[in-house]
Structure formats: structure tokens, C-alpha cells
Amino acid sequence: MIYGSLLQMPILSRAVMVIALLLGLFSCSSQCVTGFSVAPQVTKHVRPVRAWNCNQGLVTSSSSLLEAIGSTTTDLPLFQDEESSEPDLVNEVEASEHILHDDSMTVLPRHPTHEGLNAILETTEHVMAALHVQSLDLQQEQTLLNTNKIPVDDTDEQDVEDPLLNSHERVFSNSYVDLGKVSTVGFDYDYTLVTYNQELLELIYNMALERLVTDNQYPLEMLDAGLKFDPRFSIRGLAVDRKTGWICHLSYTHKVAVAWEGRNKVSSSRLVSEYSGKRAMRPQERKKRLKPLNDLFSMAECCLIADTVHFFKTRKIPFYPPNVVNDVLKSVGSTHISGDFHRLVAKNPSKYFHPTPHLKQVLDTLKSSGKRLIFVSNSPFWYVDAGMKHVIGTNWRDTWDVVIVSAGKPNFYTDEARPFREVSHTTSRVKFKKVTKLEPGEVYTEGCLKEMIKCLDWYHPSESQPTNNLQSQSAAGVNLASPNVLYVGDSLFADLVDAKREFGWTTAAVAPEVGWEIEIQSKAQFLLSQRTIDLLLHTLRKVQRELGNGLRTEDDLQILDSLERLVSRWRDEQSNLLGNPFGSVFRARFQPSLFAHSLRRYCDLYMNSVSSLRHYSPQHRFYPDDARLLSHETTGTDQECWELDRSLDNIDVHNL
């Protein structure tokens, strides 16, 4: 038996095998496939060993957890300037030891009378102990290897660097996209062609705070209270409740999964009480009360709202939450409209921009392939001109077939007849002549999509005009709906939703959180917590099968409640590892977040950076990893995938 030989192995090999075995086992519960299933975002950390197959047993396969368990990076804010530093393996080992010695996280309850249940719970407890101890051993081994600069295994270095395997450089697909059929590619500017570091959000926060005090007569003490932008508090995709001032993280069903009042977490009982006993609101009420904070700029206003509420509450100053929310939103809006921070950024782009060394390569490749490039930004020309000169060069406009600034998206998509105006690229002043044609090298402002169609030879020579009169058409009779147009932007609702929903364009979202979360989720601690959660959920299912379909006793319910609370605590641990109180941008506790749902619904592609496109041919065809949605489509039978439970009883974990 493989279990007998397992005990004869050296500790490192034994640890690798046990963790591979256990993780393969856990993966079967969600996906009955060959080998252990590692999420696509962590595949770059995986190297070959043996893995478990539900149907075939232990088989030779490609993928090892050695680097996955030992791979770490320091916890960086979302917009950290520096590259990832040396792995802080010692700190991670210490953190794992802390969890290991916290009995409340690893010891399971027992039933006073049901020995069958206790057998299940004891087995689960042993598996958890084995998982955690062997993971710790692996981390210690990896610490030694890294300290002595000994490479673990460089035989697959070529594969690891493959951009199609490296999740940080991948373009992820929600639907089938053939770039070869795309004739026009449009780009947003802010957080798309250029990405900002943390200093910009700090600047916006500070300017808005000063306006709040000077223009709205908020307490002068706020300027001396040490209030500052906190990158570890806010994430994208949140919403502020105008009535309560709470910052909320919504699931895809619009349920409030997590909420914070100032810097204090709102209890579950208050959430249930506030939101009609189900932590959710009716659609009309939701539209009235919740203000989405969907783009990366909104992280500053999210943080300022929470800090202002917290300032008033801790000092026991009476306040009305709707007034605070409105005042902060107006202050942030005025900061954007005034152009104050734009002027500072334009004077010193290198201070606020992340480097984008591959951007020009991406644009030149698309251009040389015969695709038309359109620049559509809500920012003013003088601002984007300074930025594009910094990242591309003085002649940046030569790359584009059309340059549109101050576009006013999303109204740009829906307005019927807002005319374009030409902008002088020497003085940035708006001209007064009528615009009937959009010329390469020139700059235009305002306008709308339907006017752009009139002023541009819309149809590429390689494509024929559609003849379906039922499709969306402009007043001039020109069809606007075309999957042959790809638009790339960062803001779902300003850039992408109407382009997809109204005109059927192919859309791609820039989501830097993807790369950041992949780093965290590839760490040993996060993998450990996720596999522990998987194991506990499986145990809950087994416990209920053991209890049968009859009425539960009070002791039965206490066991279920205790296991559920433990799952919740491990989910809190995951949120802590992600470095913010809301957890993953893409998950609202255990469900997909509303942001993730919108990303799936309205975006065909998404990526960490526009630079990721450099790895793909202009004729590349993207295939979604998995288009299945429903539970029965994505899971094997629980019994079938967890046959190892019986065998695991034969492992003496104390001798591992």
C-alpha cells in the first residue's frame, strides 16, 4: 500500500506526498478531475510530482506543492511601488505555528452520545493536524533552502516563465474571443493605459479632506487627527449605504456580506436588523440607498467616508450619516473637477505612475496588424498629453486613429447627438468649428458614439456592413452593434457595461487586483486556510449524512453550529491574509462578489495590466477555462471523490 511506503520516506518527501495527497483529496470535492486541482491563478507556483486521482488512485502527474507551500511574498499594498521583496518565510512559519497552537482553530467539538459522528470528527481532526504539521515542515525546509540560496528545482524554468501558465501575465477569458476578427480596439486612459501608485490616492484623500474642512466647516481637528488614506482598508467594488454611512461588500445576490461603520465591523445581528432580516434590500430601495464605489479612484472616497464616520463616533460628536456621505462624495467630486491633483500629476508623472515598459510594444503590435486604435478618455487633453508623452513619447498621437478626451463616459455611449469639438494640441483650447470628420493626429472632445460613427469610416475594409435592420442603429442608419470592436478599460460601469449591453462590443477589464490576490493566494497560509475550509465543509456534509433525514437533537445542532463557526473563523483568517477587512475583491465571504459577477457578466476578458497583451498574437483565440455555472455542473459526487477518508484512518498522523 502507498500508505506503508509513505512512512518510510524522508520528512521532506513525506511532507510533499501527504500535502499533495490531501490537497488532491480536497480538490476532488469541488472538481472530480485527474490530479489535484489547483486554481488557475496559482498554477505558476506548481511543479511536477505525483498526485491523487479520484478514479485511478496515486498517479504520476504534473504538479507539485513544494513551491506552492513554500512560496511566499511579503504582504504588499495593492499599489506598492517596489517590486516584491525577498520572501519573508520566517514570518510565515511563525504565523503558521501560531495557528497550529491555537486549539480553537484546529480542535473539533464532540457529540455526547453519537459515536459515529465522533469518529468522523476525529478523522477530520487528524487530517487537519497532518495538513498543518506537514505544511509547517515544508515551510521550514523551504526557509532553509532560500536562506542558502539553493534552487528547489529549475528543470521546468522554461514552463514557469510561459506567460500562458504564469497567472500574473495571463489574460483571463470569460467567453470565446477571436482577436483575429477584432478590427477596432479602444482604450481608456486612467488605470488602463497608465496605472497609478498609492501616492495618487493619498493625494486625492488629502485634498478632499481639506475641502471637507474648509468648504463644509467640518471640525478643524480632523486635519490634525492623523487621518490618511489606508490602502489596507478599502478595496474596489464596495458600496456606501447613504442612510447608515456603512461601507458594504455585496455578494452577487446583493446580500450585504460584510459592512463597516467607520473602522468598526458591523455585527451580523445589526445587518439582519437593518436589511429586512435577510441582509439584503429590495431593488428600488437598494438603488436609492447604495452608492457603488466601483473604480480604483473610489478607494480614496471609501476610506475618507469611513474615517469621517469613525472620527465623529469616537469623539461622540452628533452627526447624521446621510449628510456625511453626501459631503464626502461632493468633496471628492470637487477635487476631481477642480483639476488640482491633475496638475500635480501632469508636472511629475514619474512620481505617481507605475512603470509601463511594454505599453508601446502592445500598441505597435495591434497597429501593425491592421487594427484601428481609438483613444477614449474622460480626462482633459492637457492631462493625458503629459501622461502619454511620459509613457510613450512626444509623438504618441501618431499611434492612434482617433483621440477623444473629456468624453463623459458612460453618457458617451447613450447620448443621441452630442457633437464633437476639436481641441488644439498646442494650446489645449477648444475650437469652435463644426466637426464632420475625425482625423488621425487630431484631438477631439465631448461627442458621443453615434456622432463618432458618422464622423468616422467605421467599417474596416476587411469586414462587411451588417444587414440586420433589427440591430441597434444610429439616426444615420449606421449599425453600432459589433463584436468586432474591443474596448479595454478599468471601470466596469463607466467604460464597459454600456459598450457590452447596448452594442455587443467585446470588452476587456484591467483589474490589477488579480495579480495582487494571486500573490497572496499562492502563499502557504492561504492555501492552508482554503484546504481547511474545504475539509470542514466536507465534514459538515458527512455529519449530516450520518445524522440522516430525521429531526435533529439539540446536541446535533450544536455540532453543526460549532463547525460552521469554525469555517467562519477560517474565512476571517483568509481576509486577514488578504490584508484588508473585506477580503477578496472577487469574493464576498464565500460567495462571488457583486463586482466579480459584473466582471463575469459584462467582460469577455480581464487582465492584470494592458501589458499582458504583449504575450498574445493579434490573432489569438481565447477560450474560457470553465463556462459552467451551476453546482451540479462543477462537482462530482461527494462519496465518489472522498473515498480516501477510509484510507486516511489507517495513517498514524502522530508518526508522520
Image (cartoon, rainbow, N blue to C red):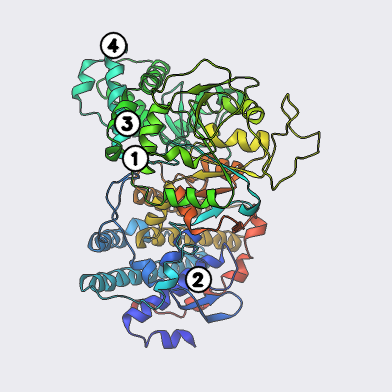
Q: Nearer the viewer, residue 540 or 79?
A: 79
Whether the residues at callouts 1 and 2 have beta carbons within 8 Å, the answer is no
Instruction: State the separation of the CA atoms marked 4 and 2.
Output: 60 Å
Badge 1 or badge 2: first in the primary sequence: 2
Give x and y (percent) for residue 106. Answer: 37, 61
Instruction: Give the quadrant of residue 580.
Output: top left
Q: Which residue is mark 1?
A: 390
Badge 2 or badge 3: first in the primary sequence: 2
Q: Residues within 10 Å of mark 4 (few under 14, many from 20)?
A: few
Which of label 3 and label 4 is nearer to you? Answer: 3
Q: Which residue is mark 3?
A: 346
Badge 3 or badge 4: first in the primary sequence: 4
Q: Residues within 10 Å of mark 1 (few under 14, many from 20)?
A: some
Which of label 2 and label 3 is nearer to you? Answer: 3
- Residue drawn at 28 percent across, 31 percent down: 347
Q: Is residue 59 left or right of residue 108?
A: right
The numbered mark at residue 24 is 2
Q: Which residue is mark 4?
A: 217
Which of label 4 and label 2 is nearer to you? Answer: 4
Asked if residue 529 is positioned above or below residue 136 in the image, the reply reads: above
